[in-house]
């Protein structure tokens, strides 16, 4: 195992995977409460309440909630203020709370309304994630090779692949940074299961909208 894949003494793979699964369910619940007329600030309050109800503590990374034109923003960019979700629109949630001293990180894109192009964009982020994960599982690629493959596949699908702020990272018992502070894209060796988050962010410049999906490898 790579030294950068070390965990602390309190690490439990079972706790990590159970927490990650619970977070994914929470994201679905939060998304169901978000609809046209909502703002990102309102969605943030919904998110806090749902996570609190499910036992999550503080965040190890700030939640990213992006509506409409803000979905084209990279991780470190600030959302344009006062964006209101429209009847035919797109949004994504990227949450990183802590549960039982373990870091979780899950993100997904959702569409309100029936805009076919937005639905395709959202679905494409999930499809691309699965393609990349399958490639890793079958060929045991390095993080670097995984993201090279992801970028090529995104181009084939007609999208721009974004790596700035969305290039994968370690996850484990908090804080994983004591073992590795870098990104998955920078790892030149094969990586192990249940230690890394694979992030997929794609942009459709024609629509001026983006989609995001992330989960554990």
Image (tube, rainbow, N blue to C red):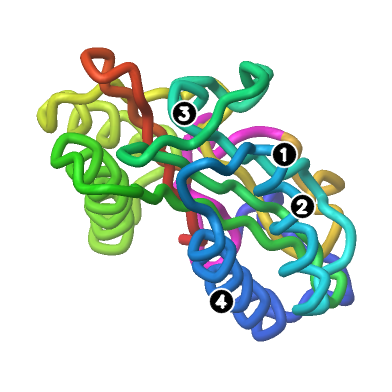
CA separation in Å, label 1 and label 4: 25 Å
Q: Are marks 1 and 4 in contact (CB under 8 Å)?
A: no
Within 10 angstroms of label 3, few (less than 14), some, or many (20 or more) residues? many
Residue 67 percent across, percent down from the top left:
51, 34
Q: Is residue 13 left or right of residue 126?
A: right
The segment highlighted magenta reads: 182-198
Q: Are marks 2 and 1 in contact (CB under 8 Å)?
A: yes
Residue 40 percent across, percent down from the top left:
64, 38
Q: Are marks 4 and 2 in contact (CB under 8 Å)?
A: no
The residue wearing badge 4 is: 21
The residue wearing badge 2 is: 45
User: Disc 2 or 3, which lies upstream in sequence?
Assistant: 2
Q: Which element is circle 4 on? A: helix
Q: Which element is circle 2 on? A: helix
The residue wearing badge 3 is: 71
Q: Are marks 1 and 3 in contact (CB under 8 Å)?
A: no
The image quadrant where one finds the N terminus is bottom right
Residue 35 percent across, percent down from the top left:
48, 51
Q: Residue at x 25, y 59 (%)?
A: 134
Q: Is residue 102 left or right of residue 32?
A: right
Q: Tag on residue 41? A: 1
Q: Is residue 89 left or right of residue 72?
A: left
């Amino acid at each position: 195992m790579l030294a950068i894949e070390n965990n602390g003494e309190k690490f439990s793979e079972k706790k990590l995977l159970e927490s990650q699964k619970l977070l994914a369910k929470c994201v679905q619940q939060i998304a169901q409460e978000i609809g046209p007329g909502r703002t990102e600030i309102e969605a943030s309050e919904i998110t806090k309440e749902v996570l609190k109800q499910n036992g999550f503590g503080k965040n190890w990374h700030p939640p990213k909630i992006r509506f409409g034109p803000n979905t084209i923003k990279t991780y470190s960019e600030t959302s344009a203020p006062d964006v209101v979700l429209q009847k035919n629109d797109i949004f994504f949630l990227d949450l990183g709370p802590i549960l039982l001293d373990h870091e979780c990180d899950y993100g997904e894109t959702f569409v309100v309304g029936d805009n076919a192009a937005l639905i395709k964009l959202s679905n494409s982020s999930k499809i691309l994630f699965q393609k990349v994960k399958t490639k890793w599982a079958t060929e045991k690629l390095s993080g670097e090779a995984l993201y090279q493959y992801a970028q090529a596949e995104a181009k084939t699908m007609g999208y721009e692949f974004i790596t700035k702020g969305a290039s994968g990272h370690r996850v484990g018992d908090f804080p994983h940074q004591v073992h590795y502070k870098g990104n998955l894209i920078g790892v030149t060796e094969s990586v192990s299961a249940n230690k890394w988050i694979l992030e997929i962010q794609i942009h459709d410049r024609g629509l001026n909208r983006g989609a995001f999906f992330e989960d554990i490898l």
